[in-house]
Image (spheres, rainbow, N blue to C red):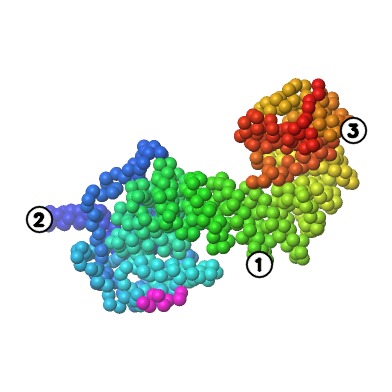
């Protein structure tokens, strides 16, 4: 009897022990709490959230299980304030198990951000949610410190307010902290965040946010996630991952403002499975609700969030919606439109042109940071608008006295990538550099040399004082400059027709030339630059000795389709023996597209052979036609850029009359108009239109 009773009790104990291992997480972890900022160790809540197999260009359609039942709003279960306070939301002093969290504490902040967070548990058991009926408002504690939160001047003061009288929901504390942090200077904000980690109540606040996450209204979930991400809480922390999962579950309840807040949050978060799932869900909802979204700023925020990988159909919907809302655009909406389109990688010329007109018309209201962002977006979208660039350049030039030289560099860099030459701004910068007494950094010197040489800025108006100032500023760096940077500097000086002796002598040393010839990936570029330097020293009569090893190789010239120009020349000159195609001028290997021999007054055309092209005769004028692409000129002008200007200068020094033909211009003309254009270029003004041809 005793044995059977003992066996029965043992079986009951074993069954009880087995059942306890399968209990909910709150039973298994009742002895200790999970740190809300500790690393996450599980997978994302929704691994296969978005249905696969959809073509990129097809409209997105949400599955029924994602959007809920049609015509039925999802039920929202909220936790009552009294129940939360009974569960321990009022805190006098932190308990021993709720130690403050700091980056150096045992709660590690680094982990795989794709892991699923573990919920924080309370030894007293999980709180029971309270169903809120539609007609009844949820009441808060009369001690809710709503007014005092607005009076807080630091993050620590907000946490002190929470510790003294915590109330539901905790979102308002996070939002108050973020509002304070974003209004602070960068140094103060960094210091305040460090103190926030060390504050005793911060860990308690994080636990309460995690405990409330599943029962918070949808907008509070989004605002909490946004505030924590902006406060730079690590993305792989339990707290962030818990809110990401809550956002996934509640995203279908979002209104326009909540979607906008979620989009602004996801925009700054690193890719992960939870983040990517939320972004995919956001794309689905935006695709379905786009025609009902009213605020332009919300649309722009969503455009930045959906990213470059969004389906083309969704991008076109966003573009169409924006075109419909153009009448509602403020000047700030027009300014932000460039960045929104660039983030989506969608080029809309109509939308960009309209916004450019508004930005240019009110350029004074555009901050310098916004102007730099607009230019960067234009570069990413490959959008060129001469009026917009001119307006920005004039705005910067109008306030140049308050700027440092280094503050101009981002604007000049973007302008250079466009091929745009802001004349007044570059003149003012040259004056500022010339009058500067402090030394320039090597990086600034190389940058200015590259920009001014590539745009051929001093072609009509040489500025020797500016070039002397740059060469003088470069001399102290010659002992530490790399061979590649030294070659770039001398190459730029040669394009500008300035030959400072100190950098040239340093470049012509045998060890420097040897290193340049064996520089691996940069070898071809170095050979081209050495070829330019060598040609300049020979053709421009520079009095400096050079060893034979300096001679480099010229890269092959790009092959252009000059069929239209050739057809027009045949109609003008009738006989093909009156011009030559693709003439190569030794020893410097300059290529001439078409060569013609004429009398000294350029009234008559003579037959030409390859030997005649290379022979200089005082009674004969050799004419070189260079067919060039649009990129060889500065944007919106016929001002030749650096390489073309150098080629024209050197071919002239070889005894040729140089005629530049804009290839794209001839291609867009009728053949009769192309013939007229070339006649005016080839024959002298006194001769045309009575020019004749002699065989």
Q: Is residue 4 above or below residue 594?
A: below
Q: Which residues are magenta?
A: 147-154
1 vs 3, front mark: 3
Report if residue 337 is visible in the image: yes
Q: Secondary structure at mark 2?
A: loop
Q: Secondary structure at mark 1?
A: helix
Distance, label 1 to label 2, CA atoms, is 100 Å
Pick whichever of labels 1 and 2 is earlier in the sequence. Answer: 2
Considering depth in this image, is 208 or 285 the residue closer to the camera?
285
Residue 333, given in percent of the width and then of the height, sits at 47, 57
Which residue is under mark 3?
618
Which residue is painted at 45% across and 62% down in the image? 230
- Is residue 415 toward the left or the right of residue 464 in the image? left
The numbered dot on residue 1 is 2
Residue 91, given in percent of the width and then of the height, sits at 33, 75
- Whether pointer 1 and pointer 3 mark residues with C-beta atoms closer than 8 Å, the reply is no
């Amino acid at each position: 009897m005793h044995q059977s009773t003992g066996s029965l009790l043992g079986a009951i104990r074993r069954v009880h022990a087995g059942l306890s291992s399968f209990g909910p997480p709150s039973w298994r972890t009742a002895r200790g709490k999970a740190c809300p900022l500790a690393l996450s160790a599980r997978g994302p809540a929704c691994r296969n959230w978005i249905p696969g197999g959809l073509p990129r260009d097809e409209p997105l359609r949400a599955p029924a299980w994602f959007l809920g039942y049609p015509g039925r709003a999802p039920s929202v279960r909220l936790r009552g304030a009294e129940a939360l306070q009974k569960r321990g939301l009022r805190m006098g002093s932190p308990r021993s198990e709720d130690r403050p969290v700091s980056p150096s504490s045992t709660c590690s902040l680094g982990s795989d951000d794709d892991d699923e967070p573990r919920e924080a548990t309370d030894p007293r058991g999980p709180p029971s949610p309270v169903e809120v009926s539609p007609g009844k408002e949820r009441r808060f504690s009369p001690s809710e410190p709503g007014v005092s939160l607005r009076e807080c001047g630091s993050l620590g003061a907000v946490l002190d307010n929470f510790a003294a009288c915590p109330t539901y929901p905790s979102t308002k504390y996070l939002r108050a902290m973020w509002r304070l942090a974003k209004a602070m200077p960068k140094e103060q904000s960094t210091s305040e965040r460090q103190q926030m980690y060390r504050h005793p109540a911060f860990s308690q606040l994080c636990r309460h946010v995690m405990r409330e996450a599943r029962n918070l209204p949808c907008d509070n979930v989004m605002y909490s996630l946004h505030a924590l991400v902006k406060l730079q809480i690590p993305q792989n922390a339990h707290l962030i991952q818990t809110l990401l999962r809550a956002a996934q579950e509640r995203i279908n309840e979002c209104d326009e403002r909540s979607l906008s807040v979620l989009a602004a949050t996801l925009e700054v978060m690193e890719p992960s499975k939870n983040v990517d799932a939320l972004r995919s869900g956001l794309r689905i909802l935006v695709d379905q609700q786009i025609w009902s979204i009213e605020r332009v700023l919300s649309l722009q925020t969503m455009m930045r969030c959906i990213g470059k990988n969004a389906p083309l159909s969704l991008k076109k919907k966003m573009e169409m919606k924006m075109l419909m809302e153009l009448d509602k655009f403020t000047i700030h909406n027009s300014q932000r439109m460039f960045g929104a389109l660039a983030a989506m990688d969608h080029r809309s010329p109509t939308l960009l042109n309209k916004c450019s007109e508004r930005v240019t018309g009110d350029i004074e209201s555009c901050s310098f940071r916004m102007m730099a962002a607009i230019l960067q977006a234009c570069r990413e979208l490959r959008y060129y608008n001469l009026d917009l660039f001119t307006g920005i350049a004039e705005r910067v030039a109008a306030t140049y006295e308050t700027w440092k030289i280094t503050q101009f560099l981002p604007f000049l860099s973007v302008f250079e990538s466009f091929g745009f030459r802001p004349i007044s701004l570059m003149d003012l910068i040259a004056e500022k550099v010339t009058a500067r007494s402090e030394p320039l950094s090597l990086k600034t010197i190389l940058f200015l040399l590259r920009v001014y040489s590539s745009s051929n800025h001093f072609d009509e108006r040489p500025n020797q004082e500016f070039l002397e100032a740059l060469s003088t500023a470069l001399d102290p760096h010659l002992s530490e400059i790399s061979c590649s940077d030294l070659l770039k500097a001398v190459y730029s000086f040669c394009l500008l027709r300035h030959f400072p002796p100190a950098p040239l002598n340093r470049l012509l040393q045998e060890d420097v030339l040897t290193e340049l010839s064996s520089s691996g990936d940069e070898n071809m570029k170095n050979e081209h630059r050495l070829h330019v330097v060598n040609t300049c020293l020979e053709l421009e009569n520079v009095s400096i000795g050079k060893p034979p090893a300096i001679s480099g190789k010229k890269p092959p010239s790009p092959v252009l389709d000059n069929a239209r120009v050739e057809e027009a020349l045949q109609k003008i000159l009738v006989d093909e023996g009156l011009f030559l195609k693709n003439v190569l001028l030794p020893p410097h290997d300059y290529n001439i597209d078409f060569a013609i021999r004429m009398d000294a007054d350029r009234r008559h055309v003579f037959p030409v052979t390859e030997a005649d092209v290379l022979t200089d005769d005082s009674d004969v004028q050799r004419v070189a036609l260079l067919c060039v692409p649009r990129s060889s000129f500065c944007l919106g002008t016929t001002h030749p850029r650096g390489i073309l200007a150098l080629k024209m200068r050197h071919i002239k020094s070889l005894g040729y009359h140089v005629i530049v033909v804009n290839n794209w211009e001839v291609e867009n003309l009728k053949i009769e108009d192309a013939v007229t254009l070339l006649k005016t270029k080839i024959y002298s003004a006194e001769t045309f239109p009575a020019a004749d041809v002699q065989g």
